[in-house]
Structure formats: structure tokens, C-alpha cells
Amino acid sequence: MVVMESQVVLKKGDSAPDFELLGVDDKKHSLASFKDYDALLVIFMCNHCPYVKAKVDAINEVQNKFKGKLAVVGINSNDAVAYPDDSFDSMKGFAKQQGISFWYLVDETQQVAKEYGAVCTPDPFLFNRERKLVFHGKIDNAMKPEDKATEKTMVATVEKLLAGQSIPKDFDPSIGCSIKWKN
């Protein structure tokens, strides 16, 4: 397991790169699929990473707290050949087992992860209604899988965004396993 920290590729104000990816609901989803939401949270994640497993409940909480206003989209870009636990079928099982309440999509070509500049799992990107980046960073302040969060970073950030308030910090790196790139 290689632990990495988020890197800045997309900057505050940059547009969300578009995508068309298959979800565990067996439907294709693109940026346009979420046009009716005031905000969009894209999180690069996978099934086997202990950092992701430790955040699923917190991600579900964000989705449920802002239901109807915020679309939360998980994207798995890991190489499923080298990491069969991250296959599409495994994603479906993981989503069911973990009670995932948000969209979970597969990025088989890894192109979407590259366009976003994602490097770790989880790696969250928050966009406003115009799909401009407002925050790239952690879900909460529990930086190791065994840590307990004392600050809900993403909840507080989404609250500010939806209230039209300024977001003081546009980058607060997440930490997790490296995305498993194809050779």
C-alpha cells in the first residue's frame, strides 16, 4: 500500500472535466446527469483501500445531509486487472455491502482520474452549480483509517457553498492509497 496526498492539478475556478461512465446501477452518467444539483462532489475511490473504507459512512452522511442539493459521485479508476477487488462486479458488491447511497462509477480507461489530477483514494473535488472547482480536499480530519474525526471538513465546506459564503481554503489535501495505474 502506497500512501499519497492529494496534488493540485485542477485549481479553484477550473471547470469540472466531463465524463461518461458506467455506474453500479448499470446506467451511464455524465456531468449533465447532475445538472439539477446546486453542487457536485466527485470523489476518486475504490473498494479495497482502508482509507476509503474508513470514509464510506462519512461520504454517505454528506450525500444524505444535502440530498437534492448536492450530487455525490464516487469514481473508481483503479486497474481492475492488477487489482481484481476493484472490478466492476466487486464495486457492485462493495456498494451493496457498504450501503452506499451515492453514485459509484467506473473509470476503466483511467482518463477521468488523469483529467482531474486525482492521485489517491479518496481524492474529493467539490464544484459549484456552474461546475467550477471551489474545494479539493479531505472529507474530515481523520487522516488515518483508525482515527476518529473531530471535524467534518466537507460538511462544513458544502454548507458554506450552499449558503453562498466564501470558502476560506480551496485546497486541504486528502490522504489515501495511491490510484493503481495501468502499466
Image (cartoon, helix red, strand yellow):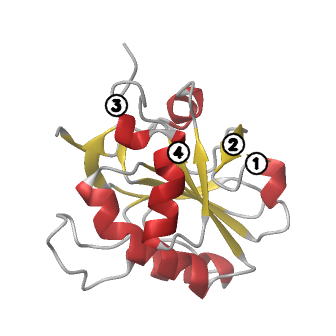
Residue type pointed to by label 4: Asp
The residue beneath circle 1 is 29
- Pinpoint residue 132: horizontal percent, then vertical percent: 68, 53
Residue 43 visible: no
Residue 146 against residue 16 in the figure, above or below: below
How many other residues sit within 10 Å of disc 3, few (<14), some (14-19) or many (≥20)?
A: many
- Disc 1 from disc 4: Cα separation: 17 Å
Tell me which numbered mark, 3 or 2, is placed earlier along the sequence.
2
Closer to viewer: mark 2 or mark 4? 4
Tell me which numbered mark, 1 or 2, is placed earlier along the sequence.
2
Question: Residue 180, labelled with which disc?
Answer: 3
Q: Quadrant of the N terminus?
A: top left
Image quadrant in which you'd find residue 160: bottom right
State the residue at coordinates (43%, 70%): 98
- Pinpoint residue 157: horizontal percent, then vertical percent: 50, 75
Question: Residue 22, labelled with which disc?
Answer: 2
- Disc 2 from disc 4: Cα separation: 12 Å
Residue type pointed to by label 1: His
User: Tag 1, which secondary structure?
Assistant: strand
Residue type pointed to by label 3: Lys
Residue 65 against residue 136 in the figure, above or below: below
State the residue at coordinates (26%, 45%): 177
User: Tag 4, which secondary structure?
Assistant: helix
- Disc 1 from disc 3: Cα separation: 23 Å
The residue beneath circle 4 is 89
Tell me which numbered mark, 2 or 4, is placed earlier along the sequence.
2
- Disc 4 from disc 3: Cα separation: 17 Å
- Mark 1 in CB contact with mark 2 (< 8 angstroms): yes
Tell me which numbered mark, 1 or 3, is placed earlier along the sequence.
1
